[in-house]
Image (spheres, coloured by chain):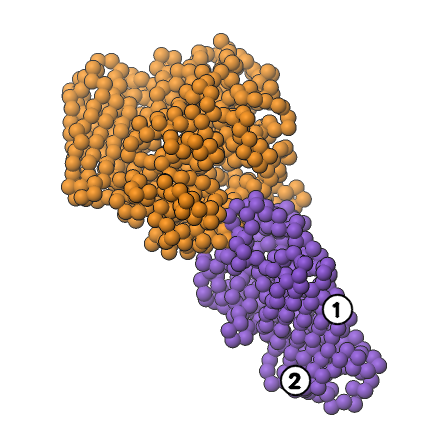
Amino acid sequence: MSSDLTYLTDLNTFCVNRMDAHSDHIHYRNEDEARNGVSGFYLCLDGEWDFLYSPDSGKREEEFYREDFSGSKVEKIKVPSHVEMNGYGQIQYINTMYPWEGKEMLRPPVIPSVNPVSQYIRYFDLADCMENDRIILRFEGVESAMYVYLNGEFVGYSEDSFTPSEFDITDKVRKKGNRLCVEVFRYSKSSWLEDQDFFRFSGIFRPVYVYSVPACHVADMAARGDYQRDGSGVFTLKLRLSYKDSFKGKLVWSLGDIASGEALLDETVLSYSSDEIRIENIKPYHYKTPHLYDLRITVYDTDGTVVEFIPYKIGFNHIEIENEMVMYNYHRLFICGVNRHEWNPSSGRAISLDDMKKDIELIRGCNCNSVRTCHYPDRVEWYSLCDEVGIYVMAETNLESHGSWQKMNAVEPSWNVPGDDPAWKAIVLDRAKSNYELLKNHTSIIFWSLGNESYCGENIKAMNEYFKNADPTRLVHYEGVFHYPEYKKYVSDVESQMYAPPQRIREYLEKDGSKPFLVCEYMHCMGNSLGGFREYDDLFDEYLSYAGGYIWDFIDQALYKKDEASGEYYLAYGGDFGEKRSDYEFSANGIVRADRVPKPAYEEVRAVYGNRIR
Amino acid sequence: MEIVFGDYSLGIRKADVSYIFAYNLGGLDSLNKGGKEFFYRVPSLAFWRATTDNDRGNGFSRRSCMWMGADLFFNVDDFSAVIDGKELKQGDLRAPGNNSLLDSPLRHAEDASVTFFLSTCTSPSAKVCVKYSVSGKSDGIRVDYTYTGCEGLPEFPLCGMRFILPFRTESFDWDGLSGETYPDRMDGGEKGTWHSDGIPECPYVMAQDYGMHMNTESLTVKSTDGRYLTVESLPDSAFNFSLLAWTPQEIEAAYHPIDLPLKRRSYLTIAAGVRGVGGIDSWGSDVSPQYRLDASGEYKTVFILK
């Protein structure tokens, strides 16, 4: 069967056959592999794929997934990348407005009638060592909706552009000569939830893997180190296990040399929980001293052979609100933060590990101690980098719908998503769950954020409840409730506002002050800006409940483009690609330029944040 | 010093330096050192900066666009001179008054100053007085700039003087704050002696004002052909400057730095007042009140050109 296009707008169908979200731990065949950082269980499918593009879904090659398909116009494309950065379709920067503004009058969940489609074909063989295992196909980021086929058969469907989607392909995969087909639609109902202020792209823009799962596998893991007021720590470890067939063996784990445990396993043992283990004299995790302990989990079979080995780094910390103050390890926290979009001036949001490492250096270099992953989960490697250097993370869920309730610069929620409509509840809860389950083991995460500028209502409230239940050890952040104050008692642990002038912050803290104040976006660093930065820093001294904020933002969104007059390349911003509508130069608000050269304002951040947190 | 009482100008000639003040143009038309000219045109009155994103967002440029014109044109209302303590009015300096100076001992003097009384092409019009002073006992030419405002004018982004240098800048060095600083963004500036190779490119993707340097004690500009121009402050009187390769109007018209013309000249602005850049947001919030420039006030700066 060809793709059932009703999925694209059916609110009940945002995933088909997609596996449950789980921790981002990586399993290795043995410790040697882990030391080298290359898991023999994984086969990376990145590279050159066959490609067909259709600007209109009605004119696509519907049969491309069939093994007997013989298309004549197959081209090549690099995976991962955005199709628009390869010359297909239209590059568009637009802020609040939905990308179809002025072209089609739509209401959710209806999508544009002309929907560009990218069809990808990749041939692959399994590695010999994978043949007896379960085989999982993993996409780390595909925008905005995809249908997956393998060897002519439908595998599954998924949305949510910024979290991994996994499919169990064990019963369809061959040892050799697999034909993987992915059909990506630029627009889906998710487009109503992914209205982030950024360049609008589509396609497979993060890595793709096939990995194998041995006879016994730690399918999910939740490890948490809670730092106690007396300097001790409480460690808990919970595991979910999966098996291919019958299995007998054991599991052994250790945390540095301070805690350990083991358990006998067989295929009926589906979970493992350690006790709450209390450990004296813990070195706490702090942005100045990001101490992490090595968690090592090994599964053995009855012969004592290692089935899989899982390393992870876990720190001990404690975040809470006490007397309307954000307290980290029992001391007041000064959040000197910055919002970060993923960006590269040559490849958009398809970024490299080197880009991430450079960002870590630049963010530390100007004395930021926290980053907000605006407004979606980042490539998963980012969180480990933050763990290692001590950058506290506000981990934001992939949700932004400001075009549905901000109209002509006014708050106008006559229709809005996700709102109160029960039909939108499961889809946004799934986004929250995907964010939490993937990232829950990262010590650097101090806030879960429900998304950005998505107004408020019953569905946002349900997301807040989800995070509170799933993870009582971290705080929940959401700003959009500011526009719907009746929900403040249900939503967000902090009073979060954006672009509040210092005086408005004083007014809240003087007249209300029932929650700590956090300015989730401030100091809009568009062009020549960041004047008056120190006035915000002064608030730390004036009010104990002022928790700090996140500068908007880290890096300009601009793309290299050739100037036809001179033949030289320059950094082009919104509107330079002939797109309408656009919000033009509003794409570029970084403290560093798109090419990662610090702007003059960077020095101001370095000085003011440095005085506060050094 | 030799004083040359011309029909259009007053010249001052020292051993290796000469100056020509253009009565009709309202200022110092020539600064010549060692036979090399440093001025492409008479200094202009500076009242504009290329709109920053925040200026655009908060409507400043719409409210204050009168000053963009004032930055291009100005009125010359009057001029006078004082030579060795003897005051000469416009009527004494221009024909036929100057005929009586042919045999005057004032043609050789130790101290001379020329003052231009200018006014802005705004409605209402504000007064600007620029006094140039030269002494046989010291090097350089002292410039005293005074803007005297009046009620009814919108805020300006900047007020001062702009020197249009006929050369490309190879490098410049200054004593003051590192990097780019504005009144509300100076914490990142570190005091010291700093060097820049050439005039930096606009660091912003949308071309806009950049490159201001607050609280400077001295500046030396080196041209690509080896000419040096130095600006010095007086004790306890630091100056603010920017050195760009384009006028504010050229930058205003550019969407991208790459749209700007080739660097052919250097525009040195010495600012008595500089508006902050702001940053609360880029769609409405103005800069804090203490960093706005009220055009009804008085603004002064003084410095020495060498």
Q: Position of residue A328 (x, y in %)?
A: 29, 43
Label 1 CA crowd tier, 10 Å (few <14, some 14–19, many 20+) = some
Separation (CA) of disc 2 from disc 1: 24 Å
Identify the chain of the residue marked 1, using the numbered disc in the image. Answer: B
Considering only vertical position in the picture, is A76 above or below A197? above
From this view, report whether residue B136 is shown above or below residue A349.
below
Between disc 2 and disc 1, the foreground one is 1
Q: Position of residue B67 (x, y in %)?
A: 68, 57
Residue A297 pos. (x, y %): 22, 29
Q: Which residue is mark 1?
A: B76
Task: Please indicate, yes or no, whether residue A77 appears anywhere in the rendered image.
Answer: no
Whether residue A271 is situated above or below residue B194 in the rendered picture: above
Query: Which chain is rendered purple in the image?
Result: B
Mark 2 or mark 1: which comes first in sequence? Answer: 1
Residue type, mark 2 in image: Asp
Q: Residue at x 71, y 73 (%)?
A: B116
Residue drawn at 32 percent across, 25 percent down: A22
Who's the residue at 46% across and 32% down the image? A484
* B200 relative to B71 in the view: left or right: left
SS for dot 1: strand
Q: Which residue is mark 2?
A: B111
Q: Chain of mark 2?
A: B
**Chain A colour as displayed:** orange
Nearer to the camera, A119 or B136: B136
Residues under numbered marks 2 and 1 in contact, where contact means CB atoms less than 8 Å apart: no
Horizontally, residue A157 falls left or right of residue A412, namely left
The residue lying at 57 percent from left, 36 percent from top is: A409
Residue B219 image-quadrant placement: bottom right
